[in-house]
Image (cartoon, rainbow, N blue to C red):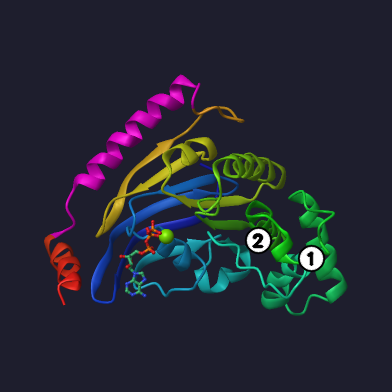
Amino acid sequence: MTAKAISFSGVRLVLGGSEIYRDVSFDVGEGEFVCLLGPSGCGKSTALRLIGDLLPIQAGAISVGGASPRDAWDQTAFVFQSPRLLPWKTTLENAGFGIEMRKPAVPKAERLARAERELAHVGLGADGHKMPVMLSGGERQRVSIARALALDPRIILMDEPFSALDHTTRARLRRQIVELWQETGKTVLFVTHDIDEALYLADRIVVFSRKPTTVSEVVEVRAPRPRDTEADPALQQLRAHLIEVFERLEGAPDAPEEAEKALAATCN
Ligand SMILES: Nc1ncnc2c1ncn2[C@@H]1O[C@H](COP(=O)(O)OP(=O)(O)OP(=O)(O)O)[C@@H](O)[C@H]1O
Ligand SMILES: [Mg+2]
């Protein structure tokens, strides 16, 4: 593997008295596209929050570009499931809002120029003047991708960014994100619980177990891009394997103390 953009080593985590991570270790190479796959509640979003320094590390080590998440805050940018646009700002201002918040020293003219360039990059070059309400769901999500790109981070952290979109829009945005990744050479860590999405996108898929979480396995996807997950026999084979892994994970009960806690929460 090339240089490491992200590394988790023996990360353990307890939140609200419950053990979330037992021992999580994985790496993301520089320029790599890695998907984080796992059952609901296993701590996928939590991994992104730890990397982005939105949650403190308790035990084990996390390095982002060789530094601690605290020192690497300007190397990462987020794209969330919901685009989180400000309805009173134009598309262009929204695309520049990440810079406005995180790099206030950047002059306004430069901020808007960068926002404009990235809007063009995601195919919205002519829409900068529009208010978010005038955009479709897919277009809004593309604005949030432009907002992340405008920060020019080395690493883009994406948390189920397409899961709220319809099937056709999702397929189109997947294609576009692969093209953007190929053009920009950014490192992408992309959270999903959709096996087909991971197979379409990833160089490698890191599968999380159920809580208390460990890395259940890491799957390499070598198929050339653009991929046809339906037609490629190697991808179909990987798909069958991942479905099996998932069935095993979904079927495995949580640790007894977890199960008791979950049940107790519904019995009050
Ligand atoms: N601040 C907190 N206090 C207590 N528990 C928390 C906190 N934040 C997250 N958790 C718990 O940590 C676990 C992991 O949460 P996380 O949101 O990372 O899961 P996820 O894998 O992203 O799930 P999903 O696929 O449903 O989005 C969950 O059980 C959640 O309830
Ligand atoms: Mg999540």
In the drawing, what numbered circle is on residue 232?
none
Left or right of residue 238: residue 165: right
One can see residue 151 in this view: no
Q: Position of residue 190 (x, y in %)?
A: 51, 51
Vertical placement of residue 127 versus 201, above or below: below
Q: Which residue is mark 1?
A: 92
- Range shown magenta: 230-255
Residue located 17% across and 69% down the image: 261
Mark 1 sits near ligand 2, with its Cβ under 8 Å away: no
Rounded to the nearest whole Å, what is the CA distance between mark 2 and mark 1? 11 Å
Which secondary structure type mostly characterizes the magenta part of the structure?
helix
> Of residues 44 and 154, which is closer to you in this image?
44
Residue 51 among those drawn in magenta:
no
How many other residues sit within 10 Å of disc 2, few (<14), some (14-19) or many (≥20)? many
Image quadrant where one finds the C terminus: bottom left
Left or right of residue 264: residue 26: right
Q: Amino acid at mark 2?
A: Ser
